[in-house]
């Protein structure tokens, strides 16, 4: 029994790539976000164009789409890196406990393992990521559209969360160039346009 335990502890710690394909997740996330961002940008464009019919030739420009999609790609990398760090940390902890590769992957009574990341720690993670990214896309698209009208120079911050900094910024008005971003995952931030002085 002692020899078997020693042999298990002597096993090299599993590599992160043996349990998770970073490139595949990057590709899948990018495909989802690019589609979602494009649809969101088009939807916001339509709403704002209807709200400001006096602005002639108001159309969605390719440059705006490209800019948002480039931002989408950079956010995919951050989501991917968060996943990578969590898995690497779990692998390192499992190895330090002397657990086998199977135990690190599937967990033990006092160690959730890689499987636990997905079934416990990240329960609802896909929905959270989708909500957060679509909210981010909506706000970025709104700012682009507000600026394109030439009629908006400020935004009112509507953020109903009870935590900070959301609570303290709720209801404040700031120059559009200082429009804040989401403070945390599932943030409910909305940016309401404020017309330039003298515009009725």
Image: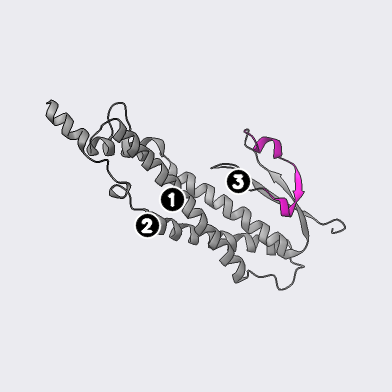
In the rendered view, tell whether residue 32 sits above or below residue 185: below
What residue does disc 3 label? 182
Q: Position of residue 99 (x, y in %)?
A: 25, 33
Q: Position of residue 5 (x, y in %)?
A: 17, 29
Q: Tell me the distance, in whole angstroms, between the alpha carbons under discs 3 and 1.
A: 18 Å
Nearer the N terminus, badge 2 or badge 3?
2
SS category of the residue bearing label 3: loop
Query: To which quarter of the image does residue 42 belong?
Result: bottom right
The residue shown at (82%, 57%) is 196
Front residue of this view, candidates 168 and 78: 78
Nearer the N terminus, badge 3 or badge 1?
1
Q: Is residue 12 left or right of residue 162?
A: left
Query: To which quarter of the image does residue 113 belong?
Result: top left
SS category of the residue bearing label 2: helix
Q: Position of residue 189 (x, y in %)?
A: 63, 45
Front residue of this view, candidates 92 and 193: 92
The residue shown at (77%, 67%) is 54
- Disc 3 crowd rating (10 Å Cα; few below 14, some 14-19, many 20+) is some
Highlighted magenta segment, given as a residue range = 163-180
Q: Is residue 109 left or right of residue 169?
A: left
- Disc 1 crowd rating (10 Å Cα; few below 14, some 14-19, many 20+) is some
Marks 1 and 2 in Cβ contact (< 8 Å): no
The residue shown at (64%, 34%) is 164
Nearer the N terminus, badge 1 or badge 2?
2
Q: Residue furthest bottom?
A: 57
What residue does disc 1 label? 80
SS category of the residue bearing label 1: helix
Q: Position of residue 157 (x, y in %)?
A: 70, 45
96 magenta-colored: no
């Amino acid at each position: 029994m002692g020899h078997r335990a020693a042999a298990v502890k002597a096993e090299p710690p599993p590599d992160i790539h043996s349990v998770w394909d970073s490139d595949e997740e990057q590709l899948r996330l990018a495909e989802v976000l690019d589609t979602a961002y494009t649809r969101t940008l088009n939807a916001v464009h339509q709403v704002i164009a209807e709200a400001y019919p006096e602005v002639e030739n108001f159309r969605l420009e390719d440059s705006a789409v490209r800019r948002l999609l480039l931002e989408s790609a950079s956010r995919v990398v951050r989501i991917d890196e968060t996943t990578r760090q969590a898995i690497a940390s779990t692998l390192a902890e499992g190895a330090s406990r002397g657990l086998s590769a199977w135990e690190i992957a599937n967990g033990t009574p006092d160690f959730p393992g890689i499987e636990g990341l997905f079934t416990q720690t990240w329960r609802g993670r896909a929905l959270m990521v989708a909500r957060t990214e679509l909210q981010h896309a909506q706000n970025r698209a709104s700012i682009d559209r507000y600026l394109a009208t030439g009629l908006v120079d400020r935004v009112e911050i509507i953020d109903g969360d009870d935590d900070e900094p959301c609570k303290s910024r709720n209801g404040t008005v700031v120059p559009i160039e200082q429009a804040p971003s989401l403070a945390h995952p599932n943030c409910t931030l909305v940016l309401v346009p404020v017309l330039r002085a003298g515009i009725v």
